[in-house]
Amino acid sequence: MVAVINLCKNRMSKVNKKIQLLQVASKSYLLISALLMVLSSIGLYFYTKHLLQNEIEEELYSTRYRIEHRLSENKIFYNLPPVSEVSQVAELHPESLKDTIIYDPSQDEMEEFRELTSYKEINAKNYRITVRMLVVESKDILLAIVFSYIIILLLIFLTQFYFSKARDKILWGPFFTNLKRMKGFSLQSGHPIELVDSNILEFSELRQEIKGLMDKVTSDYQNLKQFTEDVSHELQTPLAIMQAKIENIINDQKLDFALFQALSSFQNDMQRLVQLNKKLVLLTKLENKQFINAKELNFNALVNETLLNFKELTPIPIELDEKDTVLLKADIHLIQVLCNNLISNAIKYCAPEGSVSVLIKEKCFSISNSGKESALHPEKLFNRFYKEDKSMQSNGLGLAIVKKITDYYNYDISYEFVNKRHVFKIEF
C-alpha cells in the first residue's frame, strides 16, 4: 500500500513539474525531426532498393539479349560461370527470375545472385540461357546511400536545431526579461515596473496589458492602504474623546450604582473597540509588508521583559527555561506583539490551578499551558475572529496576528496537545 502511495506521489510530481517554454519547443522539434528522419530513411531505403533491383533486372535482360544475338549469328559463346551459362535443351520451359546463392570462384565463397533463366529456339535449336548478377554489391551501395542520407539529415537537423534555439532565445528575449522583472516587482517599493518593448506584435500587446494591469493594481493598493490608514487615524480620535468623557462622567460622585455599572460596561466595550482597531491596523500593515525596520535583537530579553509584566497581573505560575540565547533580526515591535499574544493566550486558556511553561532553545520557542482537552478545531486556531470558548472576552485576533508575524518572517508555528497541555511551538 505504501509503495502504491509513493508511486502515485511520484507520478503526481512528474505531472505537476513545469517545463521551460524553449525546452518544450526544442523537444517537439527534435521529436518531429527524428520521426521525419526515420520515415524518410525507410522510404529512401525501399525506393533505392526498388531502383537497384530494376537496374539489375534490366542489366540481366540486356545481357540475355546480347547472348541471343550472338547465338543467332552462329557465333560461339563461351560460358562464364557463375555470371552466364548457355546450354542446349530438349524442350522449352517458361522464363524464371529469382534470387539464388551459388559459389563464386573469384571470391571463393557463396554469394547471393539475381538469376534470370530463359528458354528460346535459335536457328532450330533449343537453348537455356542463364544470366546472373551479384546482389551483394548492390546492397552495399544501398546501405551506403541510406547511411549517407541519415548522416546528412542528422547534421542538417542538429545545425538547424542549434540555430533555431539561439534565434528563439533572441526572439523570446523581451518576454523572459519582462517575466524576470515582474517576479522582482513589489507593491511596497513604490517603484513602477519597467517592461522592455518588442517588435513582435503579440509581445508588445502583452507588455501593454501587463503594464496597465500593474498600474491598476498599484493604484488600488495605494488607495486601499491610504483608506486603511485614514480610517484608523479618524477612529482613534473620536474613540479617545469618548473614553475621556465616559471617565469624567464616572468620576462624578452623583452617579447611582446602576448608571455607574452601565457606564463601566460601556467603557470596557470602548476599550475593546480601541484594541480591535489597533489589531486590525496591525494585520493590515503585516499584509502590506510595511515593517521594514528589522534589526538584531535579543529574543530572551524580550521574553523576560514580557513575562515580568504578566507575572504582576496574574496569579498563575509561569516557568521559564532558557537553554540557549536566541538572536533574531526582526522588527522589535512585531516580536513584542508575538510574545504578548502567545503568553496572554496561554494565561487566558490555562486550566484552574494550572501553570504556564516557556522554553527557549536554539532556533525554537515554545509555550504551553495546562488544559483538560485538545482544541476542538486545531486547524482554525489561527483564523481571524475564531474563538474556541465563546464565553471568553476576546476578539479572536491574537493568534491570527501571531500567524501573520511568523509568516512575515518565514517562521514555522505549530500547535499540539501533549500530556494535557496546549503547546504552541515556533521554529525560527
Image (cartoon, rainbow, N blue to C red):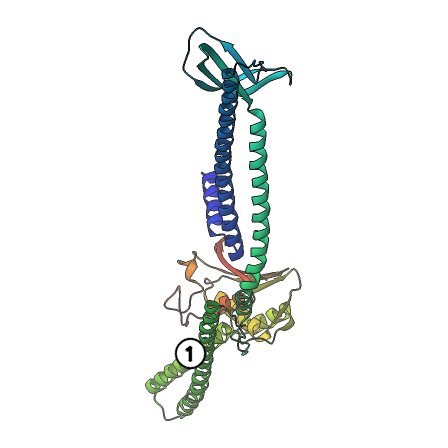
Vertical order, 126 against 229 (above or below): above
Quadrant of the snapshot with the N terminus: top left
Q: Nearer the viewer, residue 383 or 48?
A: 48
- Quadrant in the picture for the C terminus: bottom right
Direction from residue 159 to residue 382 in the image, left or right: left
Residue 332 against residue 145 in the figure, above or below: below
| Viewer-side residue, 103 vs 279 | 103
Q: Position of residue 356 (x, y in %)?
A: 53, 63
Percent from the top left, x then y, of residue 13? 49, 49
Total labels drawn: 1
Q: Residue furthest top?
A: 90
Residue 260 shows in this picture: yes
Q: Position of residue 261 (x, y in %)?
A: 36, 83
At 56% from the left and 56% from the top, the residue drawn is 164
User: In front here: 320 or 190?
Assistant: 190
Query: From what the image shows, is residue 49 above or below residue 248?
Result: above
Q: Residue 363 falls in which quadrant of the image?
A: bottom right
Q: Secondary structure at mark 1?
A: helix
Quarter of the figure with residue 101: top right
Q: Residue at x 49, y 24 (%)?
A: 61
Amino acid at pointer 1: Arg
Q: Which x, y percent locates residue 208?
A: 46, 74
Front residue of 78 and 370 = 78
* Extreme-front residue of the structure: 73
Residue beneath label 1, please? 272
> Can see residue 423?
no
Name the side, left or right, on which 139 lies relative to 272.
Answer: right
Q: Residues within 10 Å of mark 1 (few under 14, many from 20)?
A: some
